Image (spheres, rainbow, N blue to C red):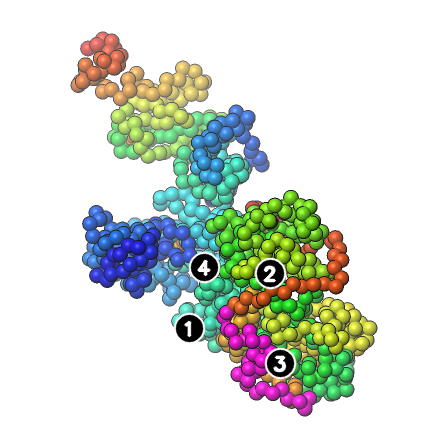
Amino acid sequence: MPKLTIDDMEVTVEAGTSLLQAAEQLGIEVPRFCYHDRLSVAGNCRMCLMEVEGAPKLAASCTAPCGEDMKVHTKSEKVKTAQKGVMEMMLINHPLDCPICDQGGECDLQDQSVAYGFDRSRFLDNKRSVKNKDLGPLVKTTMTRCIHCTRCVRFGEEVAGIEELGVLNRGEHLEIGTYVEQMITSELSGNLVDVCPVGALTSKPYAFKARPWELTKTETIDVMDAVGSNIRVDSRGNEVLRVLPRLHEDVNEEWISDKTRHACDGLKMGRLDKPYLKNSKGKLKPVSWNDAFEAISAKIKVTDGSKIAAVVGDLCDCESIMALKDVMHLLGSPHLECRSDGSKFNPYIPSGYNFNTSIAGVEDADLIILIGTNPRLEAAMLNARIYKNWRDNKVKVAVIGSHIDVNYPYVHLGTGSETLQDLIAGKHDFDETLKNAKKPMLILGTGATMRNDGLAVHALACEFAEHYNMIQDDWNGFNLLHMSASRMGALALGFTPKLENGGHDLDGIVKASSKGNLDILYVMGADDLPFDKLGDDTFVIYQGHHGDKGAAHADVVLPSVAYTEKNATYINTEGRVQIARKATFPVGDAKEDWTILRSLSAYLGRPLPYDNLLELRERMVQENDLFNHVDEVIAQPWNKVIASDISVNKVPFKLPMADFYQTNVICRASGTMQECTDAFFSANIKKRRVNG
Amino acid sequence: MGSVAIKKIEQPKSFKFSKANLDKIEKILAKYPSNQKASAVMPLLDLVQRQHQNWIPEVAMEEIARILEMPRIKVFEVATFYTMYNLKPVGEYLIQLCTTTPCWLCGSADIVKACEDHLGIKVGETSKDGKFTLVEVECLGACVNAPMIQVNDDYYEDLTAENMIELLEHLKTGDDITVGSQTGRTGSCAEAGPTTLESHAKKAKIKMAEIEEDK
Ligand code: SF4
Ligand code: FES
Ligand code: FES
């Protein structure tokens, strides 16, 4: 533990701490370009120079380790002059085109130039120019602005697992490029824009949209997948202009996936802004809220509760799920379903549907079995953890199911449930490896549960986990990975079939409808239901924010708000309760989801017992104590899932997600996501995706 | 140089190391720890260049990446960093003309002109018969015998416009090529023979006979 003085302040630091980190501990600001907390140290920009007494030259503080009794100065004349020099050199080939640069106002180069630079240029020669690179539809390049800090290269290598960016040529000709002009294919590429300290890499969809000082910044939670990445929504007026990551060490660190970042233009397109009601000719026509509610309550009043069902979709918040559950309870309906993708895992046992290891816990595992899942597409930030674990500790990864395109090597054990059975029976070569693992974990994906024998597979996976010592006192390696932001919330609130009252699951609901035994189906934001299999007699109420498949098949459409337009609660796949905040206002006549249900209950003559968000949240706590523990991961006591019918079929597990960029109504409405699909998933480019 | 140039040229579809080179690779790899195979990237690039008409195609870089278990971009980084790796086709003889100050003072401009005129190509070009490519380089560290050039692996020194053309002719036919000084100078001995340390020269048996004769 060396003790040293920096700017006459004493500090004791862990051995191996760099001078820069030590200075930061003292609250001293150190200018830097190449150093980044989360990336390896490159030490190439020389902006972080400090004077160490007794040393012949100034030291690059990001690479210099602290030593006992060092006397360090960060603001001496020598340091200041040197930093001026570095700044001047840095700007030699920089185009100084700040007025037309999107980084302006949030540019490290601009800021540090003002704070540490020289106030005029002595440079008379021509500047060099560098050809721009094509990095795909999300990242715009202006390579003349690059200062060669190599952060982007290190990010690609160390976090995203894309080894396509590199430093080419040398000296005056040095440039950042890709392997013989290849597009980068990563679901994390948007983060390159954040790591780049200058305007060389900027966001293509956000190009020339706004200046940072015009934006209102709202800290909230993402709903594009079940990870619940922490984000900041930047809006101007009532328009969301961009989404940026927010630091949360245990969830997304400081990265987000491209879908989280760039689907936001979908918030402007295809929105439902008025209630609609089907007229006698079967056409949806705009009506007033009053008429819509009257129509619904008239229908409900003559319908028996057992003939009413409700399904919640991917993006719903806990508040609205609570309200819908309460309404359904009032009506006496047992048919509640939140597994809108048709998966059949057991929804009643928390340890069975939770991601028990926790997202950060993935880094501690020494063996990871992926069953019917491709985490790279289904939970990109989780996949980044697996990649990190592989990079740092060479964690072993094994796959059961289809082959997947991930950025770490894996062993393929088999394609379906019989592989699990073989392993348990000790008839598989991998048995040894599994037995020897200290902290093994499995991730059971939707691909393994979204099938008729899903429940049996779920039970089999639990047995597998127990058999291979995945359940220990301080380690739970059993994980169900969800794909939708609403799922855990709905499960925690018990939005599940009431079996004791003959409640149907999704299949049952659809079957009942096709047989004419279901009169009302309340669909809250579920757009991927098999609508064409529903019977004509079922009156479909769709509550949601986008005019997608759900609204197209509805008899009444109730316009609600998207995730950036409400204060709401979500639970991520590891059971972490997180609060999202409202960034913009509802579109048109749309109303917040829970208030729609509250009003509806009033029309039914049985108003729900809460009038504001606080009261509603109290009701949620009543339902599940989890809501008392915001931003905590509560370990769930292990309870094994058991299936009465344990026969599994031999059909290989299929992957549930084909196109990362088109998974919900918001991304389907987004032009940027469409471009990504065209660029990355169209056949000819797929061929170019080598070693992925 | 770099990615832009390399894209325009026609690339072979596949590349395989010859049997002899595969044996060499095995020997090279034995020098490095097995988890740090990437260390062998430079000698392997060199092997490719020797096997493949003096230049390195993309497919060969991919092959190296595969053998050394490293990302292709890392191979590409090294290959673009060093100018001695040719990433596009060059002539059978790659003539590197030194034009840095000492050589220039001793008349490298004449050498460049002689080459250009004789071969009918400019610096940076390859002759039609595919025999010669001219490139300009910085100091090759043989300034004592300036002006000088490097052709493939060898240095040719003490050049004049005349002996340069002669050299080109010899290279063309492949006979009678004298590597090193074109005026018969030994090592980097002074032109008029040793003026100091004569006794040392004698001990080192540096053609004292000749020197004596000259005297
Ligand atoms: S593009 Fe940006 S991040 Fe990459 S090296 Fe240049 S300045 Fe650094
Ligand atoms: S931050 Fe230290 S050298 Fe760049
Ligand atoms: S200047 Fe030509 S070899 Fe040094």
Q: Is residue A215 visible?
A: yes
Q: Which residues are magenta?
A: A603-632
Disc with the residue nearer the chain's start (1 vs 2): 1
Kindly tell me whether mark 2's CB lies below 8 Å from ligand 1: no
Q: Are marks 1 and 2 on the same chain?
A: yes
Q: Does residue A538 appear left or right of residue A426 in this picture?
A: right
Looking at the rendered structure, the secondary structure element under dot 2 is strand
Disc with the residue nearer the chain's start (4 vs 3): 4
Image quarter hosting the N terminus of chain B? top left
How crowded is the residue under tag 2: few (<14 C-alpha within 10 Å), some, or many (20+)? many
Residue B103 higher or lower than A427, as above or below:
above
How far apart are the two marked residues, 4 and 3, measured between alpha carbons? 40 Å
Q: Nearer the viewer, mark 1 or mark 4?
A: 4
Q: Is residue B10 visible?
A: no
Residue A214's tag is 1
In this figure, which residue is indicated by the disc labeled 2?
A479
Front residue of A54 and B177: A54
In the image, residue A692 lies at what x, y percent? Answer: 56, 49
Disc with the residue nearer the chain's start (2 vs 3): 3
In the image, residue A142 lies at what x, y percent? Answer: 43, 55
To which chain does the residue with label 4 belong? A
In the image as oriented, which residue stretches furthest toward the bottom? A605
Front residue of A183 and A596: A596
How far apart are the two marked residues, 3 and 1, measured between alpha carbons? 37 Å
Front residue of A73 and B99: A73
Looking at the rendered structure, the secondary structure element under dot 3 is helix
Q: Nearer the viewer, mark 2 or mark 3?
A: 2
In this figure, which residue is indicated by the disc labeled 4?
A193
Is residue B158 a member of the stretch shown in magenta? no
Residue A323's tag is 3
Q: Are marks 1 and 2 in contact (CB under 8 Å)?
A: no
